[in-house]
Image (cartoon, rainbow, N blue to C red):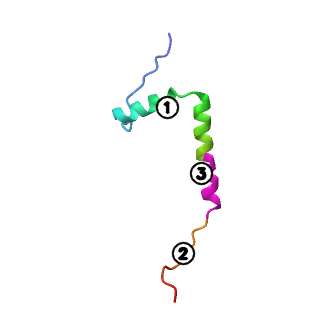
Amino acid sequence: MKDKLIIEKDEYVDDDPSLTAEIEAGLKRSFQERFEFAMRLYKIQQALKKATIIHKPFISR
């Protein structure tokens, strides 16, 4: 006798159709497009890691 896999619906699953459409569009992208997008995000992350926030007052005394 085989064990039957019982899958219950997760309460936290979001069935938003726009989110589903975005996921499907993302899965249709080629590996090259995914790689280029990931590299863009990586470069932004590296730039933000190096960035420092400096406050300069607008009015000099």
Report the amino acid beneath label 1: Gly
For disc 1, the neighbor class at 10 Å (few under 14, some 14 to 19, many from 20) is few
Q: Position of residue 10 (x, y in %)?
A: 39, 33
**CA distance separating discs 2 and 1:** 39 Å
Magenta-tinted stretch: 42-51
Would you say residue 44 is visible in this rendering?
Answer: yes
Image quadrant assignment for residue 11: top left
Above or below for 42 versus 4: below
For disc 2, the marked residue is: 55
Image quadrant assignment for residue 39: top right
Q: What residue lies at 34% left-to-right and 32% top-to-bottom?
A: 17
SS state under label 2: loop
From the viewer's side, name the closer residue of 3 and 8: 8
| Chief secondary structure of the magenta portion | helix
Report the amino acid beneath label 2: His
Image quadrant assignment for residue 32: top right
Image mark for residue 15:
none
Q: Position of residue 23 (x, y in %)?
A: 45, 32
Choose the circle earlier in sequence order: 2 or 3.
3
Q: What residue lies at 39% left-to-right and 35% top-to-bottom?
A: 19
Side of 54 where 58 appears, left or right: left
Q: Position of residue 44 (x, y in %)?
A: 59, 51
Q: What residue lies at 62% left-to-right and 63% top-to-bottom?
A: 51
Above or below for 61 versus 53: below
Side of 61 where 50 appears, left or right: right
Choose the circle earlier in sequence order: 2 or 1.
1
Choose the circle earlier in sequence order: 1 or 3.
1
For disc 2, the neighbor class at 10 Å (few under 14, some 14 to 19, many from 20) is few
For disc 1, the marked residue is: 26
Q: Is residue 47 magenta?
A: yes
Report the amino acid beneath label 3: Ile
Image mark for residue 44:
3
